[in-house]
Amino acid sequence: MRARKKSGPISSIPQLKKWSATIVANAVSTYALDAVSTVAGLLLVASGVAAGAGLHTALVLLGISYVLWSYGLSFSLTANWRLLEATGTSTSLLSKLAYDLARTSRAGIRRALCAAGYVLFELAKETPYYIGAFGLAFASDAVSGEEALVFLAGANIGAAAYEYGLGRSTSIFLGGKADKAYASFEEEWAPAEYLAGYYTAVDADEQRTIAFFTEAARRMPADEPALVFGVGPTLHHVFPIARRASEIHVGDYLRCNLDEISRWIRQEEGAHDWQAFVNCTLQSEGIADPSRQEILDREQLARRKITALLDVDIRNDLPLGNAQARYATVLSAYCADSATADPEIWQAYMRRIIGLVRPGGTLLIAALAQTQSYFVGGKPFPSPGLEAADMEDMLRDHFPQSELTIRMVPVPECAAHGYSSIILAAGHRRWADGCKEMDRTCAARG
């Protein structure tokens, strides 16, 4: 079992410190890049490449240098995004500014804006080289136009090497996780593959998850709205809370997942069949042999209770966007743990989910345990290798020990999916505990 971490994640660094670190990193990076690029440009000119080279050859060399620069820059862009996500800092002031201004936007938009800020700042750094090289060539016969172009090509080659080295160094600083071959949610996630691979029958992990949620739901606040955060294309965790909640909001990062849910709500042909999971829920509630009508009634109840499909993003400080809603019950199953392989980022994600629970409310959590990946359609997706102790450390500061239940459940039947155990957790806040925590949070924020 891993040692418990007492300190908070890197992402909890206050904004002033994040900006201070970014300013220092930006200054160091700028001077280092200038030094490397200038030396590389001078060395290429001194090598004699420019001697006898015509304008056409010099332009071709400059074009090749920009290709190399773009290649090196791609490594640095990826590493910069991971650095911003993990720490809130950057080596580029414009990229950090874009990240903060777009913090409530979807991750894809936020990433594009951060990349644009980074590239714009790097292009701005190129300006002095063009002014200096062509200014000198124009003002003095000592430097020809061809030599100026060769110098710029050398500077670009030096910049390419620097950007590549910066990207690799940042990845090493973050633990080298960028080299893990995980699939992309934005590009490779397929709801149909996920539903076919995990939800054609009620597997052992879901039997235990549904039973746990059904039991915990008996203590959730009655007749108040509930949120299912990170619902995916699934509905099986909605059924255990449908009787208690006044209404249910379901949220997910991917619109394609919410589209699957919409199809089921509208009872469209080809929508996924959840009746086996409804049956499992009713059995967990004590109905030994649910009738077809009882199953249909629970489905219809769930359809009536689902009143909102929300676009959410756990990577934002405000995962519900600009909305500031807090819920009496928040259920999040296989969400934060299935979005990252980095334990520190998982902690940041969990804190955002916990922050959606109002004082006196209930949090229901399910997570994969002791694994670094799970598989959907043969493609690996990340998981941070959690232990029960990690979940306890995460929740005990937010829920009283007497109101907290955490279970590590072996599910060897699921080994083919990439994991063989799960963690189930339920926390119930007393009103006083929630208010005290809010007071501590306000005091910490000054």
Image (cartoon, helix red, strand yellow):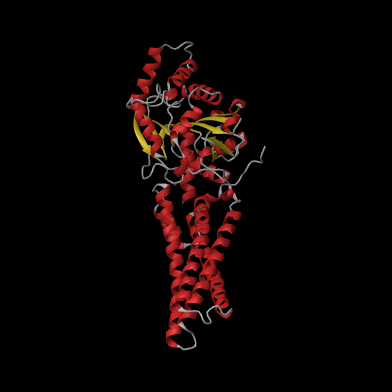
In the depicted structure, whether residue 283 falls above or below residue 41 = above
Answer with left or right where residue 264 lies relative to residue 82: left
In the depicted structure, whether residue 137 falls above or below residue 306 = below
The reply to whether residue 207 is in sight is yes
Point out the image quarter for the N terminus.
top right
In the depicted structure, whether residue 362 falls above or below residue 21 = above
Residue 253 figure quarter: top left
Residue 446: % across, % down: 46, 51
Q: Nearer the viewer, residue 46 or 13?
A: 46
Q: Residue at x 64, y 41 (%)?
A: 4
Q: Residue at x 45, y 81 (%)?
A: 145
Residue 196: % across, % down: 47, 29
Residue 252 figure quarter: top left
Q: Nearer the viewer, residue 83 or 382?
A: 382
Q: How many marks?
A: 0
Residue 384: % across, % down: 58, 41
The reply to whether residue 17 is in sight is no
Residue 116: % across, % down: 42, 59
Q: Residue at x 47, y 36 (%)?
A: 434
Q: Nearer the viewer, residue 390 or 337?
A: 337
